[in-house]
Amino acid sequence: MASRKRRRENESVPETPIAWTLPADLLLEIISRSEPRTLIRCAATSKLLRREILSPSFIGQVSHQAAPCVLAHLTYDENKHLALVHPITHVAASFCDDILSGPFLSRHAVSLFDQYSVVVSRRGLILLRRRTIKYPRELDENRCFYLCVYDPLSASQTFYSEPPGISSYCEYVLLTAADGIKCSILLVAIDHYGSSLKVQTASSCGTWSPVTGCDNHLPWWSIKTRSDPAVLNGGIIHWMENSCKEILSYDASTGKTGTVELPPTNGNVYQLHLATSSDGKMLKLLAIERFIMSVWLQLPVSTAGGSGWSLEAVINIEEKLRSLDPAIIDSQKPIKFKGFGKRSGEVVLLRVCVDGYMDTVIVFDLETMEMRKQKRGCSLLEIDLPSRLETMKIFL
């Protein structure tokens, strides 16, 4: 009897399931106190949670530990691959040194950057191209690793083969879900050196699409390639044309091409900088002539048929430059845009000539009017935390 009683006592009794679901406000409070990598992983768990994390109020809440947007130079310094460019604040410096620099200093990343060079960077992702690639049959497998999209926040890598149908001298544009396209990553390879435009695209799966061509007699061979193109929502890519007569556009979703007339400016192509509005819906053009910078914003289609511009601001930077370095004012060389900065055009890099022969790079914030000299770096990386969160895949 005793053994039977002990058996009954040892029999498993089904436990009542415990509801582990936390209130949304408490869950968001916990996430806001986490490091940025944990924040990004949480944003990838569900669309509902991502929407709450992407809200302006939440981004403002976490900005005390992770700057919403930073500009940093990739350098060749083996001890510090990232050098902060903007903003120069304690939060941004801590975010750059403690969070972003870690993946770059890892053994795997160092090996990657030894074999690959930076092609372009957009929305926190970096496109790398293999430095040397040999084509003997025994090394054909290298072709499968010709390109790599690297995420410095998560240290993830996506490899691509060389585009099989177009010239090896093609230009690349890296689009993400934050650009309003239907996939997390879209790599666009553009060959504009012939009489027509040839395009191939590849998503995160790594497979290249068939070549599409556009023979519409637009001067694609003359687009400015020494600066990042401006990309409007929906993946519409815009380049400045070298003669400064017009802007050429290509819609990566539909394949349509077009032109945009420029506002009345007198500068050459290096004194013009193409960007977008902060919401990515309209083009923005910055022009500089001597010490006067003009900011133009494209008018909506309903107002002027898509070809009109509004002069938003005129900024005289002479006194700022004089206080920074009087030798800049004495120089007769024109001030030029370096071609990179925040895609919204709120922060730009200027090239000025000092003592008649030496170029100096200046960082200019159009919102705060702050200006300072900047050491040169290898390539400029913009880490935009809200954009990076939008690009994350849903894995649950």
Image: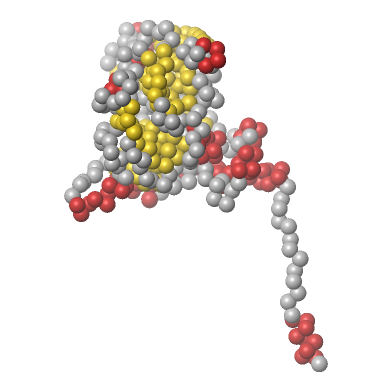
Count of numbered labels shown in the rendering? 0
Residue 68 pos. (x, y %): 55, 33
- State the image quarter where residue 336 is shown: top left
The residue at 44%/27% (across/down) is: 236
Residue 184 pos. (x, y %): 48, 41
The residue at 80%/91% (across/down) is: 2
- State the image quarter where residue 290 is shown: top left
Describe residue 44's horizontal placement relative to residue 221 as left or right.
right
Q: Quadrant of the N terminus?
A: bottom right
Describe residue 283's horizontal placement relative to residue 131 as left or right.
right
Residue placed most toward the observer, 379 or 176: 176
Residue 226 pos. (x, y %): 33, 24
* Vertical placement of residue 207 versus 325, above or below: below
The residue at 48%/19% (across/down) is: 283
Question: Is residue 187 in sight in this rendering?
Answer: yes
* Vertical placement of residue 339 versus 261, above or below: below
Question: Is residue 94 in sight in this rendering?
Answer: no
- State the image quarter where residue 126 is shown: top left
Residue placed most toward the observer, 14 or 60: 14
